Each structure stands twice: as structure tokens, then as C-alpha cells.
Amino acid sequence: MERRSFLKKIMVSAAVLMLGVNAVNAKQINWPDEITFGVIPVAGTQEMENTFGKLASYLQKKLGIKVKLVLPSDYTGVIVGMAHKHIDLAYFGPKSYCEAAKRANAEAIATEISAESGTPGYYSIIITKKGSGLKTLADLKGKKWAFTDPQSTSGTLVPSVMFAKKGINPQTYFSKVIYSGSHEFSILDVKFGKVDAASTNNLDFNRGLGKQWKKSDFNIIWKSDLLPGSPIAVRKDLPETLKLAIKGALISYDDRENLNKMKILGYAPANDSMYNGVRELIKFKESLNKKN
């Protein structure tokens, strides 16, 4: 009942927002001819071009202006691109969004609804290879470890805070620590034995099931509390009518085939305060770094 009630609220919100979109059609005179949509590297380039490319095409059709998809090589590239006004709209993780809100004038407008939980949230997880015998954090001592990107929430920030609370220093606890660059790379690094364990998240793990890996390839040895969903954000200085139109279009997005590939039900309204808990984690990690 709770899930149905939540989805009903999302549908109502979408209807209200689309009324707003229709109302501003006559006011588009101050809109740019083109906007650029940047996406953090959560998977391989081809996979992201397929899924986010379809979303960009949908937005272009809905907005009536060109929407150009760009795929920077790392999370920081998206933040810097928005800071220099080369990116107008972006898909972030929670931590990279917090950095972009501080450094690049980013404003969260929508967030993913997980197909697994039916809510706007996801989980950080730690995986090892099935048959490795590595089933606890204690088993990982002296093993090879992969974070994703320094700006990743589930792939770096959340497990780093968890380690710190347990008195674990990754640089000394593990025999080797790498940054893989994306969740897909981290998962494949574990599958093919490049590393013994890695932190990722349930959404990106599920996105590759049946394509590049199977659930039975791995042990999931740790799972975080629920994290706020990954947001799509705009630059604050875009025209208000354009921001409203983008938000309405995202919340109304209903390409079931593409949403199924992305392992989400759709998008819900988002605001900046949803990510205050992530900011607290960032502050905690920064305080630890100062002590070390």
C-alpha cells in the first residue's frame, strides 16, 4: 500500500508539473537553442549512450530545443563542465551533486525511483567473487580493493565512512587500493579477479545482470542504509520556465523499455535538502582526513 501511495503521489505531481510545462510554452523566448546534458560515468560508454541517449532525445522532443548528450571520463569532469557553463543539465550521484551544488551552481530537480525498492533511494554494497571464500570484512584484510571514483557516493564516500567507524584504514588494511573509474569497471574487476573486493551499489549492479555478469558470480557481503536517489540537476541560472519544463518532462518520462534497462521506475521530484545527510557524511570524512 505504501509503495502504491507513493507512486500515486508521483503521478499527481507529474500531472501538475506538466500543466506548468504547457503553460510556459508561450514564454520560451529566453530559452537557449541548445542545452548540454552531462552524465557521470556509471557504466561503459556504449551502455550510457543507449540509455541516457534515449532520455536526451525524449527531452529534446518535449522541450522543443536541442539536447546534446556528453559523457565526461570522470565525475569531476561533469562538475567542472557545469561550473564553466559547458553543461546545463546533469545526472549526478548524491556526493557529486553536493559538490556541484557548492562549486557549480547546481540545483536538484528530479531523482531516480529504484525498481528494487519503489522509493527514491539506493544502497551501497560490497562485493566479492563467488567461491573466493571472502564473506566478511575481516576476510578482506591484506586483499586487493577497488573504490570507484573519488566523487562517488556508494563507491567511495559511504564505504570510507563505514571503514573509519570500524577503525579500518584502507591504505594499510588492504594490500592494494585502486580507483576503477566506474561502477561497471569495479564489478568486472571483481568478476575477473583484478581485485578481491569492491564497493558499488545495487542499482548499477542490477543494471548489468544478465549482460556482463550474473548475481551468482558474486557474494554481497555488506549493504548500507538507504541513500537518497541519484539526482538530475540543472544550473540555477537557467530560465525558471525551462527548469520547470525539464522537471515536468523528467517526472513524466515513461519509456518502460529504457527505464527497465536503467533499473528504475522513473523520476520523482527532488530538492537540495534531500542531500543534507550526504553532506554530513562528507563533513565527517573531511574531519577524519584532517586528523590523519
Image (cartoon, grey):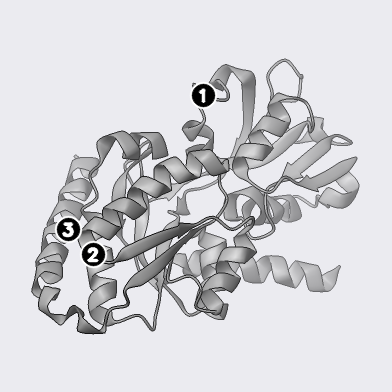
State which mark lies toward you, 2 or 1: 2
Please tell me how crowded label 2 is: few (under 14), some (14-19), or many (20+) other residues with Cα within 10 Å: some
Question: Is 287 placed above or below 221 here?
Answer: below
State which mark lies toward you, 1 or 3: 1
Residue 149 vs residue 290: left or right? left
Residue 62 location (% of width, % of height): 21, 59
Q: Amino acid at mark 1?
A: Lys
Q: Which residue is mark 2?
A: 63
For the residue labelled by badge 1, is the local secondary structure a helix, a strand or a loop?
A: loop
Residue at image point 80% right, 52% down: 167
Q: Earlier in the sequence, mark 3 or mark 2?
A: 3
Q: Amino acid at mark 3?
A: Ala
Residue 287 location (% of width, % of height): 73, 72
Residue 143 - label: none
Q: Which residue is mark 1?
A: 211
Are the residues flagged by discs 3 and 2 in contact, CB closer than 8 Å? no
Q: Which residue is mark 3?
A: 14
What's the distance in space between the residues labelled 1 and 3, CA to CA?
A: 32 Å
Q: Nearer the viewer, residue 14 or 69?
A: 69
Question: Is 100 placed above or below 12 here?
Answer: below
Q: Nearer the viewer, residue 197 or 192?
A: 192
Confirm whether residue 231 shows in the render. Answer: yes
